[in-house]
Amino acid sequence: MNVSRIKLYDADPNVLIAFSKSNVEFAVGLGNEHLQNMTNPSKAQAWIQNHVQPHLSQTKITCITVGNEVSNSNDTNLMQNLLPAMQNVHGALVNLGLDQLVSVTTAHSFNIIANSYPPSNGVFRQDLMQYIQPLLEFLSQINSPFLINAYPFFAYKDNPDEVPLNYALFQPNQGMVDSKTNLHYDNMLYAQIDAVYAAIKAVGYSNIEVRISETGWPSKGDPDEIGATPQNALLYNGNLMRRIEKKEGTPANPSVPIDIYVFALFNENMKPGPASERNYGLYYPDGNPVYNIGLQGYLPEMVMPSKSNFLSVNYLVCTITCLIFSWELSRL
């Protein structure tokens, strides 16, 4: 499929070894369950030495995401541990001479934004500022990006009478004009990105790049999940890929090409929650495409396992469903 970058939610050695001597770049993840341990510098360094350093000679690991959507947890201890964990992971990379190879950041839910309309009025939630401000200071110091998980699908699903579907899907539409900047937006994702830039600037930082660590559109949902169809998923991801290919920037940051990971490679058939949560994948677990988005080739057929090897195959499938990937479309 000519995938050039993959984002994992862990640092599974089976995946990292499988991609040794390839040109695929990896962002590996430290789950929220590890944050408490990472507040101990020696444990942070041990994690790097055990899970990252052994692979660097063969596999391109360029980023570690410490925690995922921690602010959504409503866990005060978790939020308090996030920055010290990030600082210790970065400190361990410095100690090991790896900080120029591997960056450190964390991914946030778009829910941290209190206001996103118009984009130039974007601001963070006030109740989170005690955590966000020092985190921004740290990212600024180490020159790391601010990652956000942004899903126009949710905005459309919650307000289908107010959010034009074509605006959410990158389809032709009249768009909207930011009354403050007079900038025109023809899609919601770019407006969301610029709202995050505005929120960061409002705190006093202008040197932090915003990147999308997750976005996508489900091909199926519950009856009340309006818009979750294969046709809309194809339009969203297909149109987004064409935008990525153009290396274009957003209206407020035209010189900074959008940097986006698309969620997800496989449908996660055992994931809890609404039906949409199990249907973000471009492929079914058997390797067949959910819809034809134009990627080259098909995945090898996955033979149903016998009882003797079910666990190992099931583990592989569960691991792969956690991949997020982006493309260099010029290679397709």
Image (spheres, rainbow, N blue to C red):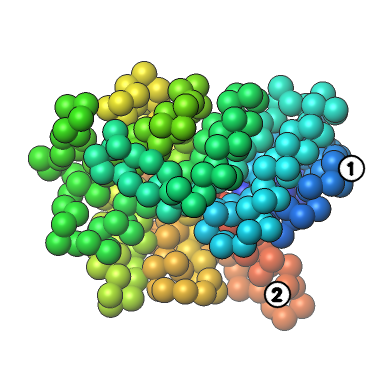
Q: Residue at (78%, 38%) from the top-left corner?
A: 88
* Closer to the camera in the image, 106 or 212: 106
* Circle 1 residue: 42
Residue 66 at x, y percent in the picture: 66, 45
In which quadrant of the rendered image does the C terminus lie?
top left
Residue 230 falls in image quadrant? bottom left
Query: Crowding at label 1, few (<14), some or many (≥20) Cα neighbours within 10 Å?
Result: few
Q: Is residue 187 above or below residue 313?
A: above
The label number, if any, that marks residue 331 in the structure image: none
Q: Earlier in the sequence, mark 1 or mark 2?
A: 1
Residue farthest to the top? 255
Along the viewing direction, whichever of 160 and 309 lies nearer the viewer: 160
Check disc 2 and report the residue beneath it.
310
Neighbor class of circle 2 (other Cα within 10 Å; few <14, some 14-19, many 20+) is: few
Q: Is residue 3 visible?
A: no
Q: Position of residue 237 (x, y in %)?
A: 34, 48
The spot of residue 191 in percent (x, y) is 29, 39
In the picture shown, does residue 97 fall above or below 61?
Answer: above
- Element type at mark 2: helix
Q: CA distance from mark 1 to mark 2?
A: 37 Å
At 33% across and 59% down in the image, what residue appears?
A: 154
Return the x and y of residue 309 as percentages of the image width and height: 74, 73
Relative to 175, residue 271 above or below: below
Whether residue 228 sits left or right of residue 58 in the image: it is left
- What amino acid type should be assigned to the residue bearing mark 2? Phe
Residue at (32, 52) in percent of width and height: 152
User: Total number of numbered labels?
Assistant: 2
- Residue 291 figure quarter: bottom left
Q: Residue furthest left?
A: 174
Which residue is at a point 47% across and 27% down the rendered structure image? 204
Q: Is residue 128 visible?
A: yes
